[in-house]
Image (cartoon, rainbow, N blue to C red):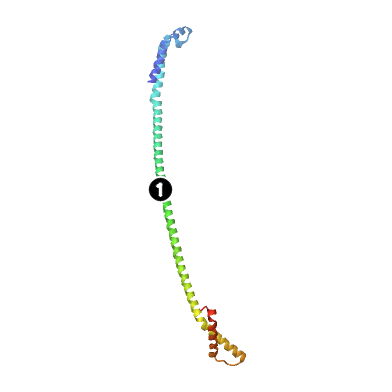
């Protein structure tokens, strides 16, 4: 449409300009009316050939290139949109995986802490029982020692006294008389020493 208007304006410009007629006396052959037909012929032939070459050869290639670029750009945009959607899906999956991992790690930590506290409490209970058993054993031993201490002390006192008398006096002394004296002394002073 634009090409048609262009050619028509060129054609009518030669017909309607009166100044062209006035300039023919100046000797310009382009403005001489007898050469107009040949000029119009060559003009139509030149621009027609140019028009055909442009419309049949150059413009289809340009429009094909533009179409292929447009389709390639659209394909690239679609591919970019698809990759963006894939990235968003993967990012959501990653965030979900991280949150699940955090929850799992927290649960494992809580379980481990509870287990450690339980083990510590169990070991403390076992140690408390062992300590109580040891204390009760020691108390029993102390009771037995307290109970047997006066007899042992008396026996040691009798043996020591008989040996001392034998060394100092050189005579044998009856152990029964010495044990009677030790028993008598232990009865008098025993409550003070043994806590009875």
Residue at (42% x, 12% y) in the render: 14
Residue at (40% x, 48% y) in the render: 96
Q: Is residue 126 above or below residue 58?
A: below
Q: How many marks?
A: 1
**Front residue of this view, candidates 16 and 165:** 165
* Quadrant of residue 5 within the rendered picture: top left
**Front residue of this view, candidates 194 and 104:** 194
The picture places residue 179, in percent across and down from the top left corner, at 53, 88
* Quadrant of residue 91 within the rendered picture: top left
Can residue 41 be seen in this snapshot? no
The picture places residue 167, in percent across and down from the top left corner, at 61, 90
* Quarter of the figure that contains the N terminus: top left
The picture places residue 22, in percent across and down from the top left corner, at 45, 7
In the visual, does 173 lie left or right of 70? right
**Front residue of this view, candidates 105 and 13:** 105
The picture places residue 16, in percent across and down from the top left corner, at 41, 10
Residue at (40% x, 36% y) in the render: 77
- As helix, strand or loop, the secondary structure at mark 1 comes to helix
Q: Is residue 139 above or below residue 156?
A: above
In the visual, does 18 lie left or right of 169? left
Q: Residue furthest front?
A: 188
Q: Residues within 10 Å of mark 1 (few under 14, many from 20)?
A: few
Can residue 114 be seen in this snapshot? yes
Q: Residue furthest bottom?
A: 171
Give the residue pinned by disc 1.
96
Q: Residue furthest right?
A: 168
């Amino acid at each position: 449409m634009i090409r048609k208007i262009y050619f028509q304006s060129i054609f009518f410009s030669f017909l309607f300009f009166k100044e062209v007629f006035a300039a023919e006396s100046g000797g310009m052959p382009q403005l001489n009316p007898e050469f107009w037909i040949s000029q119009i012929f060559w003009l139509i032939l030149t621009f027609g050939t140019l028009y055909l070459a442009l419309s049949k050869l150059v413009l289809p290639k340009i429009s094909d290139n533009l179409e292929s670029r447009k389709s390639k750009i659209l394909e690239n945009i679609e591919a970019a949109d698809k990759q963006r959607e894939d990235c968003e899906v993967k990012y959501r999956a990653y965030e979900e995986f991280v949150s699940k991992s955090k929850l799992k790690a927290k649960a494992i930590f809580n379980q481990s802490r509870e287990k450690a506290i339980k083990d510590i409490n169990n070991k403390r209970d076992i140690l408390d029982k062992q300590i109580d058993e040891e204390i009760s054993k020691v108390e029993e031993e102390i009771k037995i020692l307290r109970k047997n201490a006066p007899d042992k002390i008396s026996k040691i006192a009798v043996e020591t006294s008989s040996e001392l008398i034998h060394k100092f006096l050189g005579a044998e002394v009856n152990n029964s008389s010495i044990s009677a004296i030790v028993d008598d002394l232990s009865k008098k002073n025993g409550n003070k020493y043994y806590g009875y």
